[in-house]
Amino acid sequence: MLKSFEVTGFKNFQNTFSMDFSKVRDYKFNESCIKNSIIGNAIIYGKNSSGKTNWGLALFDIVSHLTSNNVTPGLYDNYINIASGRGEAEFRYVFQFDEDIVKYEYVKDDDKTLVSERLLVNDNLFLYKEYCDNGEEDLCGVKEIAPTLNFSFIKDESILRYILNNAALSPEHSLYKMMQFVSNMLWYRNLDENRYIGYKSSSKDYYTFIFDIPNAMQEFQEILQSAGIDVALSKEKDTDGKFRLYASPSCDPLGKIPFYETASSGTRALYSYFYWKKTSPNLSLLFIDEFDAYYHFELAEAIQKELQTLPAQVITTSHNTNLLTNRIMRPDCYFILSEKRLVSFADATKRELREGHNLEKLYMSGEFNG
């Protein structure tokens, strides 16, 4: 699992911003939000332009850095924070796999160009490399587990990526577990588009998966009906010979219309959620940006509760204060992002928050600002 993450100099993060998933309080309610003493479910709040989307992009930079999984074009434009004057972005990850702690840090001067990388396993240096002429390097740990690999020709590519793709690591090795974790990370957003990072290299099945997975169309129809959308779904062949999803009101089964072209923004967002739910069964970390932007508050709450049942770590961003309640989660799992820091509600106030506190009211009154 991801234990902590820090970023400096990326997009709007001029200074160092961090999120410590191991900073768990002793609350005795909603304990399902904590997995193996690490925060498993979190919601990030913040004003418009505070950087909630950019935080997710920073966290997922490692996906394009170490894997060939999809990154929607344009997401990493304007990569470096120009106000910092550094010309570089630094990323620091700490993973925990059973008793092993893996610390991975790297520096880039644009979205594809490495300046340096450093990896420690249980505080023992595994590799260090500066990607410049005559730069320092220490590859002792690397050569120990991959003695037959030739690193002399590597100039710009991450040595860690090269190892993970070419070394025969045991499934029990912490680096193998790290690669599996990173490969199964997924970021997506629900703002009327299918933009995503990670998990797979393509989503060509976005419009057709519902026909290929047994009972998926019936399941999605039931989800729509439970959300108050009383339609019947069907698979119809269009004039071009391709099958497409159609919908008709339950009261008029003959009045069929193309589903996706005519669905509301909220219904399309629900379709995206269902798509990723059905096609990404082995998630390690899921980040949904503005996950409830088009949802009715009751639907948002239902989905948030369903997300808490996933074995993966789940982070969502939201402006929906109806979700700010100890009935759903707990103060150490709600975070607020400002221009100064990213901090949990439990650490954003001197008040000792307990189950009886009204978090929404405290948030609206400015208790957690600054």
Image (spheres, rainbow, N blue to C red):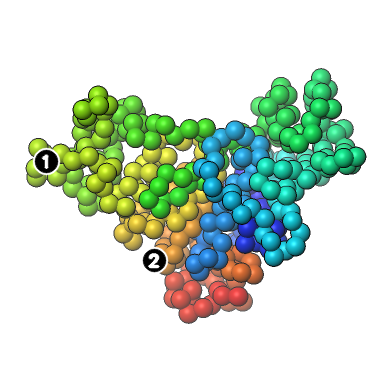
Viewer-nearest residue: 354 or 264: 264
Instruction: Say which amino acid is labelled 2.
Output: Asn
Residue 51 visible from this viewpoint: yes
Look at the numbered discs 1 and 2 and tell me whether their residues touch, using CB distance below 8 Å. no
Please say whether residue 42 is visible from this viewpoint: no
Residue 351, by quadrant, is bottom right
Please give left or right for residue 203 compared with residue 40 in the image.
left
* Residue linked to disc 1: 255
User: Which residue is labeled 2 in the image?
Assistant: 322
**Could you tell me residue 131's position as x and y percent?**
81, 41
* Depicted 202 relative to depicted 107: above or below: above
Which residue is found at the position 74% from the left and 56% from the top?
A: 87
- Of residues 322 and 38, which is closer to you in this image? 322
Quadrant housing the N terminus: top right
In the rendered image, residue 169, in percent from the top left (x then y), is placed at 71, 25
Find residue 235 and report its image quarter. Answer: top left
